[in-house]
Image (cartoon, grey):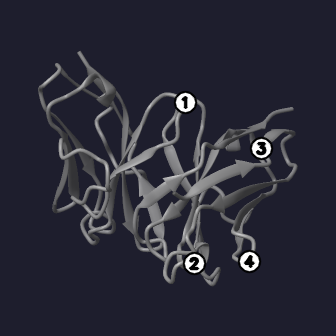
């Protein structure tokens, strides 16, 4: 079982937007609407920021948005803030398995 | 607010066994919102690496799933009467060295997202 593919890094200036892609296959992202995204700061536990492709948990600002097209999911962070800097992971249900993406390090310039 | 606390990590030699525990609290007891209503996960993160899903167990313990890298060596279990999740690890290898997180799924059968996470426990496999 292979991990979902994400770009290693992404960056933007404060106030700008950054979009992270997450590429899977027809056996995972392409077949299910159970795509989620997690934010992780150094030495902290991951935090759920998007679930079921585009839904936000209570307390997560609407600057975070998710979408999916075919076998690829995307996370967009708008109005970048310093606290958005960290690692981001996608995740997809894959018929009994639970696959994480390779992770993207977001830098706020 | 649901809280998860892992324990049982440590330094062990290759080929040995270790059992991790995860204590879950904060459920109101209202119908549909108790520990026994949710699937649970173990996720690990090797030093400087990404997240890897290790194992999933359904809400009632009737089904479990494992990553290829641990199948046959690790066993996930739960005790719904004690709000506890476990991971029995055997034949440990150096590549099992990681921080192990327990996490609660939004669904009962492990299809959804990991809504709540513990802070993790470090397992180091070294001679």
Q: Of the residues tagged 4 and 2, which is closer to the observer? A: 4
In which image quadrant can residue B111 be found? bottom left
- Could you tell me which residue is drawn at 22 percent across and 54 percent down? A73
Instruction: List x then y, in percent, for residue A7.
Output: 28, 35
Instruction: List x then y, in percent, for residue B51.
Output: 50, 45
Secondary structure beneath dot 2 equals: loop
Q: Does residue A55 appear left or right of residue B38 in this picture?
A: left
Determine the chain carrying the residue at label 1.
Answer: A
Report, in whole angstroms, how far the alpha carbon at label 3 lies from the one at label 2: 24 Å
Determine the chain carrying the residue at label 2.
Answer: B
Which sits in the foreground, A27 or B6?
Answer: B6
Q: Are marks 1 and 3 on the same chain?
A: no
- Could you tell me which residue is drawn at 32 percent across and 66 percent down? A34
Secondary structure beneath dot 1 equals: loop
Seen in the picture, residue A89 relative to B81 is either above or below; the reply is above
Report, in whole angstroms, how far the alpha carbon at label 4 lies from the one at label 2: 12 Å
Report, in whole angstroms, how far the alpha carbon at label 1 lies from the one at label 2: 29 Å
Asked whether disc 1 touches disc 3, contact meaning CB atoms under 8 Å apart, the reply is no
Instruction: List x then y, in percent, for residue B98.
Output: 65, 39
Determine the chain carrying the residue at label 4.
Answer: B
Q: Which residue is mark 2?
A: B59
Secondary structure beneath dot 4 equals: loop
- Could you tell me which residue is drawn at 52 percent across and 79 percent down? B30
Asked whether disc 4 touches disc 1, contact meaning CB atoms under 8 Å apart, the reply is no
Give the class, few, some or many, for how many residues have Cα within 10 Å of label 2's Cα (few <14, many ≥20): many
Check the image and name the residue furthest to the top.
A109
In which image quadrant can residue A6 be found? top left
Which sits in the foreground, B49 or A12?
Answer: A12
Q: Which residue is mark 1?
A: A43
Q: Which mark is residue B81?
A: 4
Give the class, few, some or many, for how many residues have Cα within 10 Å of label 3's Cα (few <14, many ≥20): some
Q: Which mark is residue B9?
A: 3
């Amino acid at each position: 079982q292979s991990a979902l593919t994400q770009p290693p890094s992404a960056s933007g200036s404060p106030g700008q937007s950054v979009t992270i892609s997450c590429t899977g296959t027809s056996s995972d992202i392409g077949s299910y609407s159970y795509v989620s995204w997690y934010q992780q700061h150094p030495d902290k536990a991951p935090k759920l920021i998007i679930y079921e492709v585009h839904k936000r948990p209570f307390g997560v600002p609407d600057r975070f948005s998710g979408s999916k097209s075919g076998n690829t999911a995307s996370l967009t962070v708008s109005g970048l803030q310093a606290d958005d800097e960290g690692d981001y992971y996608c995740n997809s249900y894959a018929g009994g398995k639970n696959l994480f993406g390779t992770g993207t390090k977001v830098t706020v310039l | 607010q649901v809280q998860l606390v892992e324990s049982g990590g440590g330094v062990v030699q290759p080929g040995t066994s270790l059992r991790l525990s995860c204590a879950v609290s904060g459920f109101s007891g209202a119908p549909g919102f108790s520990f026994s209503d949710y699937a649970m996960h173990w996720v690990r993160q090797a030093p400087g690496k990404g997240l890897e899903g290790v194992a999933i167990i359904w809400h009632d313990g009737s089904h479990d799933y494992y990553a290829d890298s641990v199948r046959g060596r690790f066993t996930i279990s739960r005790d719904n009467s004690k709000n506890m999740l476990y991971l029995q690890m055997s034949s440990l290898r150096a590549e099992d060295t990681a921080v192990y997180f327990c996490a609660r799924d939004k669904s009962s059968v492990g299809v959804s997202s990991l809504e709540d996470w513990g802070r993790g426990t470090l397992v180091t496999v070294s001679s």
